[in-house]
Amino acid sequence: MTDENPTEKSFFQEHISQRFNAELEAIHDRVLTMGGLVEQQLGDAVTGMAEAKTELAEKVVTSDYQVNAMEVALDEDCTQILVRRQPTASDLRLVMAVIKTITDLERIGDEAERIGRMALHFLELDRESGPISELGEMGEHVRGMLRGALDAFARMDVEEAVRVAQQDIQADSQYEVIVHRLMDQMMRNPETVPRVMDVMWTARSLERIGDRARNICEYVVYFVRGKNVRHTSFEQMAQEATGDRH
Amino acid sequence: MTDENPTEKSFFQEHISQRFNAELEAIHDRVLTMGGLVEQQLGDAVTGMAEAKTELAEKVVTSDYQVNAMEVALDEDCTQILVRRQPTASDLRLVMAVIKTITDLERIGDEAERIGRMALHFLELDRESGPISELGEMGEHVRGMLRGALDAFARMDVEEAVRVAQQDIQADSQYEVIVHRLMDQMMRNPETVPRVMDVMWTARSLERIGDRARNICEYVVYFVRGKNVRHTSFEQMAQEATGDRH
């Protein structure tokens, strides 16, 4: 049966039980749906902040509950699969990768909500100062990382996972540049401290989101290679990712 | 056998397999060992920052790898238990609570490391400005929350878990006070911006550590009551915690 009717997602084990196949695929799909929503939230939050769009920022703040509800439901369903199916090998790794990924996605949603709140606060203080271009750039980069991490998760593609994880280096350096520029600005124009701090917190949130996108990439490597690459360097991660091919 | 030879940890199920009992107890004990180390790291980091103790800050920065190694080993052992024992009911909830708790503990260790780095940077900029009293106070409060969360986890004590989770309200308000005071200081003395920002980031790290201690409390309620209380209010959490007794 496996050969005649291959599943589209070739990285899944095929089981005698069609139902179990369907359950695992459904869980995997729902993570991607949740990820899509979080990516949207992040995009809206950054645009709200960088381009002074109050209504986008408000939308983010009022819809974080959806992400939270998805996390709780997926977490419960993963636990149910552990109980009913007692998965082993790559099935178990998939369930574990899902449990960890949804935690990071939910926390990215929280950061997006924080950015949304920051934007509302910022726009109250100052509607005149115009778009904040560096923040938009860093926001785009980090959003691209999240999108890439979700793509890697969708196809369980280790090469893509390693590539995206490495983009965190650029996110960190963008962050450093922004922080130094903002500190200069506060020293030169101390009256701007309150509104500059909103931008500072937003940059910090973006930096953390980059870290969490990197975490998701690590879970992809864990699923595919069975290796935990947390706390390893980018080089070690790349080696583990391609290790069994050389 | 259960009655004649009760386990010390009465919240554990007794199993026919003595070995499984021992495995679960060992995992639980190791979480507490890891927690103790993280609490020590946090204490050293805060004292390093608040009382200008360079050697303590250095110690924190150079020993975070131990916490990371404990997380990786415990995570692997939990996965092994899922494979070999295929736990259900409260055994499964224990394993899931451990997997989540060690993630939060590891991230608290990361925040402690950040505080340690901040302290070293801060002490380089300015060795003269003396202890930072509010930071010490907030640090003590948050460290107390972590200790309380670990105590709740040690005894799987839901009342304690709810009590500690509620202390996060005070951590948040201490944080707000510190942030406002620091913003005032930067506006009045713009030349202090760089070193005040180190204190600001430290306060932010402490605030996040409070959130994570609260997460651990939520896992205790999950283990004991089988209810996911993430994204619920303190009132709902307290209700779930005591719910089945009224």
Image: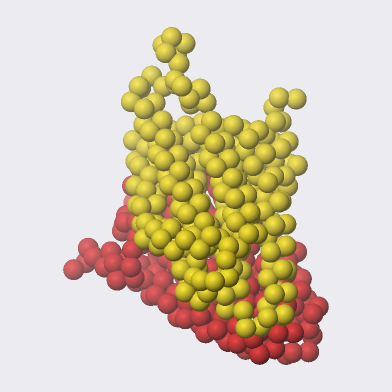
Chain colours: A yellow, B red
Closest to the observer, A112 or A158 = A112
As drawn, B169 above or below B92: below
At 65% from the left and 33% from the top, the residue drawn is: A159
Q: Residue at x 71, y 51 (%)?
A: A169
Residue at 58% x, 62% y is A131
- Seen from the viewer's position, the closer of residues A193 and B56 is A193
Q: Position of residue A144 (x, y in %)?
A: 59, 45
Count of marks placed on residues: 0
The quadrant holding residue A21 is: top left
Give residue B223's position: percent from left, percent from top. 37, 57
Residue drawn at (45%, 39%) of the image: A32
Return the x and y of residue B208 as percentages of the image width and height.
53, 68
Comparing B58 with A113, the one in front is A113
Q: Is residue A147 above or below residue A46?
A: above
Could you say which is closer to the camera, residue A208 or residue A43?
Answer: A43
Lateral position of residue B100 relative to residue A231, left or right: left
Q: Is residue A146 above or below residue B84?
A: below
Can the viewer see residue A205 in this picture? no
Q: Quick check: can you spot residue A234?
A: yes
